[in-house]
Image (cartoon, grey):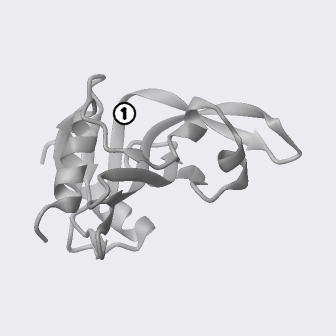
């Protein structure tokens, strides 16, 4: 079995375990982003009225950096390397908006070892004006982002 296929299967099982999503429903490959990172989404979409919540998983081709704030000094943070991340998005299909509600960073490509989790409800993110914090604000669905359009189509399409 090719190593990429084994990694995808591992991501499906591990991601399902960590997120509490059913193991039967594995992550589905969307494609690659501009940097060559693998993009996946989980088919277990939670729908409530005009809103839909879904999870995406990204395996980076090159490690990136995620911020970790010092709780005693919220203006100071350090950057840590991560190789994959899982994001939870909430789409309002009627208003055509999206909000990143949770983002978990992992030190490995399989999503086995979480480093830190950020939520849109974190006080620091709500009060901060950095580009990182701005990701967690509700915005119109961007037509510039191929990934966001694909996820919006899955979230707001027919169940």
Percent coordinates x, y for residue 12 in the rendering:
27, 60
Most distant residue in the front direction: 95
Q: Quadrant of residue 2?
A: top left
Q: 10 Å neighbourhood of mark 1: few (<14), some, or many (≥20)?
A: many
Badge 1 element: strand
Q: In the picture shown, does residue 76 fall above or below 5? A: above
Q: Is residue 43 left or right of residue 83?
A: left
Query: 51 left or right of 114?
Result: left
Nearest the viewer among 86 and 106 is 86
Q: Which percent across, then down, holds residue 57? A: 34, 49
Give the camera-side residue of 122 and 108: 122
Q: Residue furthest right?
A: 72
Q: Nearer the viewer, residue 87 or 113?
A: 87
Q: Is residue 1 visible?
A: yes
Residue for badge 1: 60
Picture coordinates of residue 20, whole percent (x, y)? 40, 74
Q: What residue is shown at x 52% (from left), y 47% (from top)?
A: 136
Q: Which residue corresponds to the image point at 57% horizontal and 30% vertical from the top-left?
A: 131
- Residue at position x 21%, y 43% from top? 149
Asked if 79 appears above or below 157 in the picture, the reply is: above
- Percent across and percent down for residue 52 are 30, 66
Picture quarter containing residue 140? top left
Relative placement, left or right, of 145 versus 5 is right
Which quadrant is home to the C terminus? Answer: bottom left
């Amino acid at each position: 079995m090719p190593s990429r296929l084994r990694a995808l299967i591992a991501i499906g099982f591990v991601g399902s375990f960590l997120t509490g999503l059913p193991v039967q429903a594995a992550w589905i490959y969307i494609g690659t982003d501009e940097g060559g990172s693998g993009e996946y989404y989980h088919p277990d979409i939670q729908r409530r009225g005009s809103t839909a919540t879904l999870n995406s998983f990204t395996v980076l081709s090159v490690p990136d950096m995620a911020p970790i704030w010092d709780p005693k000094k919220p203006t100071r943070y350090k950057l840590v390397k991560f190789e994959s991340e899982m994001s939870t998005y909430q789409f309002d299909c009627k208003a055509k908006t999206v909000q990143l509600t949770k983002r978990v960073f992992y030190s490995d490509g399989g999503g086995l070892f979480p480093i830190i989790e950020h939520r849109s409800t974190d006080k620091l993110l709500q009060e901060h004006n950095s580009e990182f914090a701005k990701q967690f604000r509700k915005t119109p669905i961007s037509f510039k982002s191929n990934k966001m359009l694909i996820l919006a189509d899955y979230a707001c399409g027919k169940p």
